[in-house]
Image (spheres, rainbow, N blue to C red):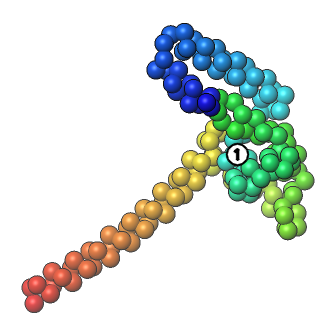
Amino acid sequence: MSRIVSSTFALQAAGEDRAVAREEARQQVEKMSEAMIKEKGLLNHAQAALLLDVSTKRVGELVRLGKLTDFTFLGRKYVSMREIWDRNKQDLKAGRPPHPMGQRFPGQAKAAARTDGQYAASYFKKQREAANERRRAEFRKKWREILQVRKNERKG
């Protein structure tokens, strides 16, 4: 049984089981803290993808290929901030020439400014919600036109 499922069941279990789950979580948090100090921080895959200007699938692929070290704490996957910066300095992109320094920094600064410092998906969620709102507005506009035409047909 995975740690997430076991910790979820532990919330509903007897006091002893909850105590064991709480102790395991505390140990994992300690290990995570040590790893964060050693690796100069940890990023989730979405944050790493944003900084590397690749997809989250590509980050997962880099982990599988051994190019990035995978850390799993409390059921969540993280990668090393140090490795991300090293890879970013190399400016490796499959099939693309390296970006000039003038283009590199603004893109990174823009990506970093749009995150909340914890989870990069909020930026993508905001973009998706804005696109959905535009679609809804267009849809409402079309329906109003259709209803107006029908209303005029009934009158005439």
- Whether residue 109 is visible, yes or no, is no
Label 1 neighbourhood size at 10 Å, few (<14), some (14-19), many (20+)?
A: many
- Residue located at (48% from left, 57% from top): 129
In the figure, 66 relative to 18: above or below? below
- 15 horizontally vs 150: left or right: right
In the figure, 97 relative to 21: above or below? below
In the figure, 97 relative to 85: above or below? below
Instruction: Farthest residue to the left: give it.
Output: 155
Where's residue 2, x and y in %? Answer: 62, 31
- Residue located at (49% from left, 21% from top): 11
Instruction: Farthest residue to the right: give it.
Output: 90
- Whether residue 5 is visible, yes or no, is yes
Q: Looking at this view, is 7 or 138 the one in front?
A: 7
The residue that mark 1 highlights is 45
- Residue located at (48% from left, 12% from top): 14
In which image quadrant can residue 135 be found?
bottom left
In which image quadrant can residue 57 be found?
bottom right
Where's residue 125, x and y in %? Answer: 53, 52
- 136 horizontally vs 147: left or right: right
Figure quadrant of the C terminus: bottom left
- 117 horizontally vs 108: left or right: left
- Residue located at (52% from left, 58% from top): 128
Q: How many marks?
A: 1
User: Circle 1 sits in a helix, a strand or a loop, which is it?
Assistant: helix
Inspect the image, locate mark 1, and give the three-letter code of the amino acid beneath it: His
Q: Looking at this view, is 155 or 69 the one in front?
A: 69
Figure quadrant of the N terminus: top right
- 34 horizontally vs 115: left or right: right
In the figure, 146 relative to 125: above or below? below
In which image quadrant can residue 24 be found?
top right
Q: Looking at this view, is 150 or 117 the one in front?
A: 150
